[in-house]
Image (cartoon, rainbow, N blue to C red):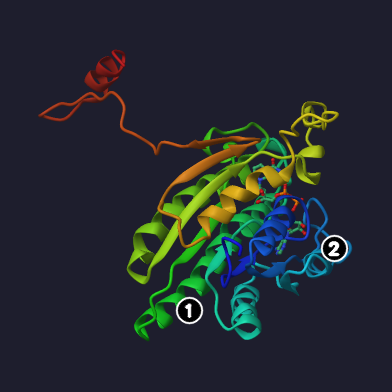
Amino acid sequence: MGTLDGRVVVVTGAGRGLGRSHALLLAAEGARVVVNDLGTTTDGAGAEGDPADEVVAEIVAAGGSAVANRDDVADWDGARALVACAIEQFGDLDAVVNNAGFLRDRAIVSMDEEDFDSVVRVHLKGHFAMTHFAALHWRERHHAGERRARALVHTASTSGLFANPGQSNYGAAKSGIATLSQIAAQELARYGVVSNCILPGARTRLTLASPGLPELMEAPDGAFDTWDPGNASPLVAYLVGERCRFTGETFSVIGGLVQRMLPWTVGESVDSATGWTAASLAESLESL
Ligand SMILES: NC(=O)c1ccc[n+]([C@@H]2O[C@H](COP(=O)([O-])OP(=O)(O)OC[C@H]3O[C@@H](n4cnc5c(N)ncnc54)[C@H](O)[C@@H]3O)[C@@H](O)[C@H]2O)c1
C-alpha cells in the first residue's frame, strides 16, 4: 500500500531534475503518473533527448504505472492535451504538479524581449494554462456530483520571493506563480481543490549552470546529500495526497528543512485624515 494508491497525477517537466524525482516518488507511492517533458535545452531554445520516455521506463521497471507526454505546457492547446492525456490514459486527473521551466539569466540592461517573454511564458503561463484546464475538468466532475480531493502544486523560487539580481524575468514569473497559487486556492476550494506552492533548492542542470552553486552543492561522501532533488519530493507527495490539510500555502524545502512561508504582511504606516501634500507626505515618510 502506498500513500497515493489510486491517485492520477501529472508532473510537468518530469524528465529531469526535480520533476523526475517527484514522478519517481509519486509512482513509488502508488500514483499513476503522466510524465510530461518537452526535452528542452537548459535555456529552452532547443530540444535534446527524450527524457519523459526514460523516466517512464524507470517507473515501469520498478513496478509503477506511468505514461510519457511531450506537450508544451505553456501552449494553450498543449496544456489542454496534457490534461486530456491523463483522463484518456487513467480515467481521471487528481493532481497537477507544475514544475517545467528553464532559465535565461541576464541583467535588466542586457535582457532582450525573447529572453523575457520565453521565461515568463514557460513558468507563469505554463503554470496558469495547466491550472486552467485541470480546473475546468474538476469543475465538470464536481457539478456531476463527484467529491474527490484534487490538488495543485506549483513551483516558485526564492528568486521570486526574495529577488535575485540577473533573474528579473524568472523572479517576476516565480513571484507571480506564488500569487497564482493563492488565487487558485481561493477560487477552486468550491470544487474540492487545494493549491500550494513550493520553493525547492536542489542540484539540477539549472543550478549547476549558475556561478558559485556547483561548489556549494557538491554531493558529500556518505553523508546526507542536502542538495539531492529527491529531498523535495516527499513534500510534493504529501501536497498531492488526500491527507493534505493545507491550501494557499508556500513551503520552502531544502534538504531536510521544510519551512512554511509567511505571506506579504502590512508593516508600519503613516496616515492622514485629510490627505497629503507632496511635502507633508515626504516629511512623514522620513519617520518610517
Ligand atoms: N533546482 C533548483 O534549485 C530550483 C530552485 C527553485 C526553483 N526551481 C524550479 O524547479 C523547476 C524544475 O527545475 P529543475 O532545476 O529540476 O530543472 P531541469 O532543467 O532539470 O528540469 C526542468 C524540465 O522542464 C522541461 N521543460 C522545459 N520547458 C518545458 C515545457 N514548455 N513543457 C514541458 N517541459 C518543459 C525541461 O525539458 C526539463 O527536463 C523549475 O520550475 C525551476 O524553476 C528549481
Q: Residue at x 40, y 39 (%)?
A: 263
Separation of marks 2 and 1 at Cα, in angstroms? 30 Å
Placement of 11 over or under 181, stated as above or below: below
Placement of 89 over or under 102, stated as above or below: below
Q: Picture coordinates of residue 256 (x, y %)? A: 62, 35
* Camera-side residue of 67 and 210: 67
Placement of 18 over or under 228, stated as above or below: below
Q: Picture coordinates of residue 139 (x, y %)? A: 40, 77
**For residue 184, what is the image quadrant?**
bottom left
* Camera-side residue of 217 and 80: 217
- Asked if ligand 1 lies within 8 A of label 1, the reply is no
**Within 10 angstroms of label 2, few (less than 14), some, or many (20 or more) residues?**
few
The amino acid marked with disc number 2 is Ala
Q: Picture coordinates of residue 257 (x, y %)? A: 58, 33
- Asked if ligand 1 lies within 8 A of label 2, the reply is yes
Q: Picture coordinates of residue 131 (x, y %)? A: 51, 66
Write down the residue under mark 2. Answer: 47
What is the secondary structure assignment of the residue under circle 1? helix
**Within 10 angstroms of label 1, few (less than 14), some, or many (20 or more) residues?**
some
Write down the residue under mark 1. Answer: 137
Q: Residue at x 44, y 68 (%)?
A: 149
Q: Is residue 191 left or right of residue 273?
A: right
Q: Residue at x 73, y 69 (%)?
A: 64
The amino acid marked with disc number 1 is His
What is the secondary structure assignment of the residue under circle 2? loop
Q: Is residue 18 left or right of residue 98?
A: right
Q: Indicate which disc, 2 or 1, sits on the residue closer to the N terminus.
A: 2
Q: Quadrant of the C terminus?
A: top left
**What label does residue 160 carry, if any?**
none
* Camera-side residue of 261 and 127: 261
Q: Residue at x 35, y 58 (%)?
A: 186
